[in-house]
Amino acid sequence: MRVLVVEDEADLADAIARGLRREGYAVDVAYDGDEAVEKASVNDYDVVCLDLNLPRLDGIEVVRRIRADDVGQPTRVLMLTARDSTRDRITGLDEGADDYLVKPFDFEELKARVRALLRRDAGRSGAVLRVGDIELDSSRHDARRDGHQLPLTPKEFALLRYFMSRPGQVLSQEDLLEHVWDENADPFTNTVRVTVMTLRRKLADAGDSQPIETVVGRGYRLREQP
Amino acid sequence: MNPPGWLVDRLPEWARSIRFRYTLLYSGVLFGLAAIVVAAIYLVLLMNLRHEPVSASRGAFCPRYGDCIRLVSLSEFERLVNSRTLKELRNYSFGALGVLFVASLGVGWVVAGRVLRPIGRITAVARDIQATDLSRRIELPGPDDELKQLADTFDAMLARLDAAFAAQRQFTADASHELRNPLAIIRTNVDVALADPRADPDDLRQTLIVVKRAGDRMARLVDDLLALARRQEPTLEHEQVDLGVAVTEASDDFMVPAAARSIVLDRAIAPGVVVTGDRDALKRAVANLLENAVRLAPAGSRIRLATGSEGDRAWIAVADEGPGISPEDQPHVFDRFWRADKARSRADGGTGLGLAIVRQIAESHGGHIRLQSKVGVGSSFVIWLPVTAPGTQADTPTRPHAAHAPTPVPTPVDRARTRPSFGPPPE
């Protein structure tokens, strides 16, 4: 899952990015409105955490441009605002933001809201994802197959979560790089292939079949039925 | 027209109204005047007319038997007629006065009601207006009379109150916004650091540095907010302040920071200019102007600080050599929380309140502040203040005393009657 944090207070933006990365998200940071629009037009973000009060380009304008760019899966926008007047929040929501959080916020709440926004696309209401005999609890960072806990690294966890949010879909290496790795990943390494391989091995160790299959020439798919 | 208190307390509700009292007054005055006029007419007639009833008969004239006419003299007959007329006049006058009294009560009640109706409207609107909804106005229709003027005065007062409340709300919203950002930084950094069980001492130290930075910013902000709030009260100290001494003291603190950026701070302080006011506030105003200049001016440039007086007004001027303020930004620089470049000046530690405080200090001293600026050339801020004792060497500003590097307290050596190399811009 790829997240863009847009915040002009560098100390805040970096802390949010650090905290979300630890949750296994691929996080990019933009420090002003122009940079945010530029990054959003290049990368396909799943969630944008957006401060409304930005230098150069106002947050509302950023939402508008992100919405204008939306093709396919919509980008979820979580507004962060230091103004608690209802009018600001209404404007933000009307312009296309999906949720808001008033500063200063509890970081646990930010994480929970990001998870909730990601669930909207998956069409589920609970925090636990289930595909076949695989279970993934984002809030507790816990993945199991057949009741056995999987010893996953944060990147493998993020990769499995992305597969589980799109069960049955063929996902190319580019898709995975785009949504699970941040902009610092080198697209020319085989990091995606290696991580998929280790994830598949760990999944196979915990069960009797391989749930992630290779679709030759196109990518990988998580089977809905084992 | 104000009845004594003990009487008012005993009166029923309706009898305590102004309408009732005016009706009584109107009716009473009308009745009294009418009674006086009628009585006067009656008395004049009574005194001037002979009016005894016929007392003696001068015999009788009987043209036919049993059909006699009493004979009286003509004047006696006149008196008889007069007497009867006066009696009739008296009776009708009493009747008319009675009718007039009743009618005047009715008319008075109606007229008083008409006159007082706008006041009822003013009262109703004023009662409706709560502190939260000051947008309503009385908007009394009708000619421009006393009551309309009263209503218009109310409306103007409401408009001022509305503006003041709106400004206060805006200020509170701005202040909370400014305080929430550093709070969010502290909270999020602490949350993220605490959530990581494997954080090493370097990570934690980094978090502490960030938290300290945010804490310092909040402390500065709270200081500035308090300074602004205090200035809003008219509780300024009123002492005689030697402007030259105060400005010199305030600028001494900036010698080292200026030198650190290789900025030259030139001072041209005129001696003996005395103003009435708050010494610390004036020093703070100068310090805020210098702080901006030292922070924003290009390294290696020159900042000029001068004081002087013209007629009954003193001035303090701070001029730098860049970067200048664009014409569209100039009207906003004295607004609270306004920043030319938000991201940069916040990182530099600016609270966005410095110039707002300067303006407030100038205005609370009965003065004002003027700005002249050109992008790429520089800005000059001039504070104008009323002088306390005109004529005390007021018209002899000194030639600029160049104070390169840290040389505290320059002594004004040259007292030639020349203006400093730069002075206040023409107003």
Image: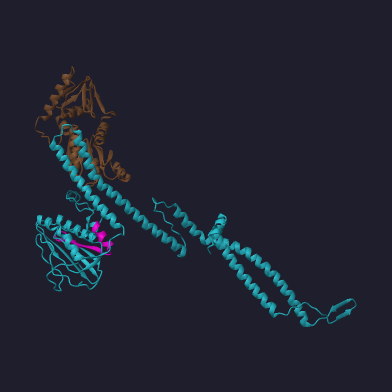
Chain A color in figure? brown
Numbered range of the magenta stretch: B356-381
Quarter-of-image position of residue B214 = top left
The reply to whether residue A32 is in sight is no
A52 shown above or below B127: above
Query: In this rendering, would B300 be left or right of B107?
Result: left
Q: Residue at x 41, y 61 (%)?
A: B153
Q: Is residue B267 magenta?
A: no
Colour cyan maps to chain: B
Residue B314 in the image, given as x and y percentages of width and height? 22, 68
Q: Within the image, what quadrant is residue B355 found in? A: bottom left
Please identify the quarter of the rendering in which residue A130 is found: top left
| Residue located at (58% from left, 68% from top) | B29
- Left or right of B48? Residue B378 is left
Q: Is residue B59 left or right of residue A215?
A: right
Q: Position of residue A168 (x, y in %)?
A: 22, 25
- Residue under the point 68% across and 70% down: B93
Residue B160 position within the rendered picture, expressed as x and y whole percent measured from the top left = 36, 58
